[in-house]
Image (cartoon, rainbow, N blue to C red):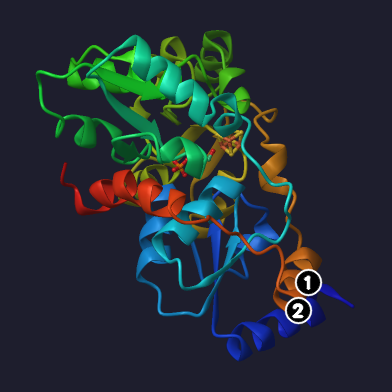
Amino acid sequence: MTDAQIRDRIDHLRRERHAVILAHNYELGEIQDVADFCGDSLELSIRAAETDAEVIVFCGVRFMAETAKILSPAKTVLLPVESAGCDMADMIDAEGVRRIKAAHPGALVVCYVNSTAAVKAECDLCVTSANAPEMIRLLPPDREVIFVPDRNLGAHCAGITGRPMIFWDGCCPVHQRMTAAMVERRRREYPEAELLIHPEAPPEVVALADYALSTGGILRHVRESAKKEFIIATEIGMLHRLEAEHPDKRFIPLTEQAVCPHMKLIRLPDLLRSLEENRTVIEVPEPLRARAEVPIRRMLNRKF
Ligand code: 13P
Ligand code: SF4
């Protein structure tokens, strides 16, 4: 089948199955182009919670599909490639959260959305890179705060809110490779460009950027900016939509090495097979699902 035929078949099946195709901003261009909606983790969670589709095909990684299932348990949630995971989410498990809680009795636990359902079920509040400082400000000031699993996003939030936190020692290997030397080089090459970075990068690199933003925040910032050149310090999948939306602007990746292998697994034939064969179905068993929903609902309702 040609790509055009695959796309036609996907269109037919998405209508027949009352399915919505959600894609993360790091997915391959061919997937972003057929999705009903592309976004960052927060935007995708909101869509998953509000859609009236019967089937959600989640083109992203497992924790994102799990979050959709937690919020919409009556719907069928499909992850087209079962092995699409997140290395950072896998750096902590439920037992790890229980251990760090036991070492800090009375502390509240904030989890980055990049975590498994089992981890979320142990936590008090969920955040994404789009809302983390704002959410942390909702927490009662007299309680200690533990932040899992991303030490970099945690440090970024502590810097913005002035709130000391206890960090789990996790990170995103893709963003962790970004260095101050890369920033210096790009600044020399493109002195007029604005540097937009994802807060999963190391704090000493984030400190050198003009703005630290979620992937959705980067897209919004570029739309509103009069600047013509941007150095993009996050996963390179971001460039697809930026370039499509702004043919008059120039986007330079901080490094071409910033490729998340999990976000590149889903291709058009996988998406088609997912709709045809109903795979892979994401399940989050009760009562774990109900416990994991609590910190996510607090985030969506912006209420602690
Ligand atoms: P955003 O929520 O900013 O899209 O980041 C998600 C993420 O970490 C994927 O790596
Ligand atoms: Fe996880 Fe990093 Fe890939 Fe995002 S880019 S899905 S945090 S491994």
Q: Amino acid at mark 2?
A: Glu
Q: Amino acid at mark 1?
A: Arg
Please tell me how many numbered marks the rendered image carries: 2
Q: In the figure, is residue 235 to the left or right of 110?
A: right
Report ligand 2 position as a quadrant: top right
On-image quarter of the N terminus: bottom right
Which quarter of the figure has residue 295?
top left
- In the displayed image of the protein, which residue is found farthest to the right? 1
Q: Answer whether residue 40 is visible to the viewer in this image.
A: no
Mark 2 is surrounded, within 10 Å at the Cα level, by few (under 14), some (14 to 19) or many (20 or more) other residues, namely: some
Give the label on residue 273, or none: 1
- Identify the residue at image location x=43%, y=53%: 287
Residue under pointer 2: 276
Percent coordinates x, y for residue 96 in the rendering:
50, 21
Look at the image and tell me in which quarter the C terminus lies. Answer: top left
Nearer to us in this view, 71 or 156: 71
Q: Rounded to the nearest whole Å, what is the CA distance between mark 1 and mark 2?
A: 5 Å
* Element on which disc 2 rests: helix
The residue tagged with tag 1: helix, strand or loop?
helix
Left or right: residue 224 compared with residue 116: left
